[in-house]
Image: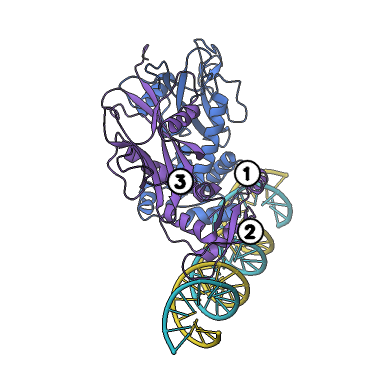
Chain colours: A purple, B blue, C yellow, D cyan
Amino acid sequence: MPVTQNIKVAVDAVVFGYTSKEGLSVLLIKRNIEPFKNSWALPGGLVGDHESLEEAIQRELREETGVNITYLEQLYSFGQPERDPRNRVISITYYGLVRPDAFVVKAATDASDVNWFNIKKLPALAFDHTTIISVARERLKSKMLYQPVGFELLEEKFPFSELEKLYLAVLDRPIDRRNFKKKITKYGFLEETTEKQALEGAGRPGNLFRFNEEKYYQLQKEGISFEI
Amino acid sequence: MPVTQNIKVAVDAVVFGYTSKEGLSVLLIKRNIEPFKNSWALPGGLVGDHESLEEAIQRELREETGVNITYLEQLYSFGQPERDPRNRVISITYYGLVRPDAFVVKAATDASDVNWFNIKKLPALAFDHTTIISVARERLKSKMLYQPVGFELLEEKFPFSELEKLYLAVLDRPIDRRNFKKKITKYGFLEETTEKQALEGAGRPGNLFRFNEEKYYQLQKEGISFEI
DNA sequence: TTATTAAGATACTTTATAAAGATAAAATAT
DNA sequence: ATATTTTATCTTTATAAAGTATCTTAATAA
């Protein structure tokens, strides 16, 4: 057993955003220090001596990106000795979700150091961050099948087709609208409002839906969980 | 961002063992150093500067317990600043499974420093290890519903009732034998041998079953996954 | 302006699959 | 022998998936 240890601890986050136009996207920052200077990377940084891991990643996201996270969960810890070419750094990773209003694509100039990238068009990334993103994606995929995390990626009120498109984008496979609707409405946590969706193109406009958090918690307490 | 960091990195493991007689059990060691001297705790220790996290936990398990792990997977990372009363230590935890032959209850004397404890009769534990065990248990529970990890806790050949009892013990809820058998046999990775189980008491003796790893991998490649 | 068509939403129907019910078979115990 | 215990199979019922048709609205054409 080693008496002294020379390992640093970092936190990094895979932040997902979504709009039906842009698809599922990930928030990246351009590194301005070595190693991997000028490469795109996940937001993150070293953990402070007196802050929790959650506090650390929230602080880094605030400092580096300013986005407003609506959902955050620990993903996995990556600790291969060679993952950082300079020092031994273990990264404890998180994945987060933001609402469309926080998901402003190409906010400033193209030379900006913070940007969103479609999940299918990622640039070359620093360290093992490509691996981390694919692990996060798989996690989000499986999570969405039995927990209502998807709503954290949508506006408060949304047409049903938006929810369907989101599931399509994340799961990367076709969704059966009829049965999908039956499954997800039978529990009652998805409320139908009387408001109609703003029209874009032809077709009958549908009502807007809203996720009722309280009803979902109630179901959880009763041990009822949904499935897609 | 801190320029220097004073955080240590440890790995700890929740190792599960099972027999129908003893039930689902966890491997613990008695600490012989402060803090929590003489308390029971999870096996684990500090990560070496040049070893991976997996190598670290395998080394610690070998050194501290000598058990032969058949399955090991990362669980979660615990990093509350106060979880160790002396230093800041972040623990990256794993959970593992062993076969019944490695699961020798009360191996040496009662004063031994390594022992198995039934999951429902755990002693007071050091640090946040009680929390870690409950997280591990929930993980094992949900994992067993869609991955064949349970077989790592059984002998190579086992009567179907053993598998049923294992699921009962881990899931902590009744199992419908008829449908359970249909579900788990329809994929073909559970092979029925012609050998009959050794009889203990009344009842019709059943054939022994065996998990066919290759067939399972084949199914995985085809994208077929099972469900309980 | 009015009919027609296209896009999307919704309801109803059939088919497939899973859950629950019931019975039979093989062994031990009395 | 007869009851009891456990395994195995067959049948019925419930639920979910897939198929089909209808309704509502906007865009387009007459």
The residue pinned by badge 2 equals A193
Crowdedness near tag 1: few (<14), some (14–19) or many (≥20) residues, C-alpha within 10 Å: few
Query: Foreground residue, B24 or A54?
Result: A54
Indicate the secondary structure of the residue bearing disc 3. Answer: helix
Disc 2 vs disc 3: which is toward the camera? 2
Indicate the secondary structure of the residue bearing disc 1. Answer: loop
Q: What is the three-letter code of the residue carrying label 2?
A: Thr
Q: Which mark is residue A60?
A: none
Q: Residue at x 50, y 70 (%)?
A: A203
Q: Chain of mark 2?
A: A
Spatial CA distance of label 2 from label 3 is 27 Å
Q: Residue at x 46, y 46 (%)?
A: A140
Q: Can you give x and y, in whole percent of width and height, for residue A189 in the image?
A: 63, 52
Disc 3 vs disc 1: which is toward the camera? 3
Horizontal side of residue B162 vs B98, given as left or right: right
Quarter of the image holding residue B8? Answer: top left
Spatial CA distance of label 2 from label 1 is 39 Å
Disc 3 and disc 1 on one polypeptide chain: no
Q: What is the three-letter code of the residue carrying label 3?
A: Leu
The residue pinned by badge 3 equals A140
Crowdedness near tag 2: few (<14), some (14–19) or many (≥20) residues, C-alpha within 10 Å: few
User: Is residue B16 positioned above or below B175 on the image?
Assistant: above
User: Is residue B3 positioned above or below A157 on the image?
Assistant: above
Q: What is the three-letter code of the residue carrying label 1?
A: Arg
Q: Which mark is residue B173?
A: 1
